[in-house]
Amino acid sequence: MGIIAWILIGLLAGLIAKALMPGKDPGGIIITMLIGIAGGLLGGWLGKVIFGVDSIDGFFELSTWIAAIIGSLILLALYRLLTRNRHRHA
């Protein structure tokens, strides 16, 4: 897949992750989109490492989308943990 496809998957995966984990996040939509793009990459990598499968088969493959969404959820949860701890100590 090309870089444009990765960006599109990441943007949509970030939006889906935000819908699955609603709440107020510092940074707004731009941070959510960046988390989605990074989450897509993380999800693909985790699929290969943990399950030994090529989870990134193509743009329209369900495994690609599931991996991207799971990766986005993981990064969104980590982001919330890090920013919540930072605001408590300030």
Image (spheres, helix red, strand yellow):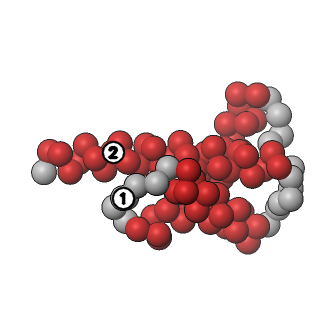
- Give the secondary structure at mark 2: helix
Foreground pick, 19 / 7: 19
Q: Position of residue 53 (x, y in %)?
A: 83, 34
Read off the residue under disc 2.
82
Read off the residue under disc 1.
24
Q: Position of residue 26 (x, y in %)?
A: 34, 61
* Farthest left residue in view: 90
Q: Is residue 41 visible?
A: no
Residue at screen point 73% across, 46% down: 66
- Give the secondary structure at mark 1: loop
Q: Quadrant of the N terminus?
A: bottom right
Foreground pick, 47 / 24: 24
Q: Image quadrant of residue 38?
A: bottom right
Q: Amino acid at mark 1?
A: Lys
Q: Is residue 48 above or below residue 29?
A: above
Q: Image quadrant of residue 51?
A: top right
Q: Are marks 1 and 2 in contact (CB under 8 Å)?
A: no
Q: Is residue 39 above or below residue 34?
A: above
Q: Is residue 26 left or right of residue 57?
A: left
Q: Position of residue 13 (x, y in %)?
A: 64, 58
Q: Earlier in the sequence, mark 1 or mark 2?
A: 1
Q: Is residue 51 left or right of residue 40?
A: right
Q: Is residue 16 above or below residue 67?
A: below
* Neighbourhood count class around disc 2 (C-alpha, 10 Å): few under 14, some 14–19, many 20 upward: few
Of badges 1 and 2, nearer the viewer stands: 1
Q: Is residue 85 visible?
A: yes
Q: Is residue 43 left or right of residue 15?
A: right
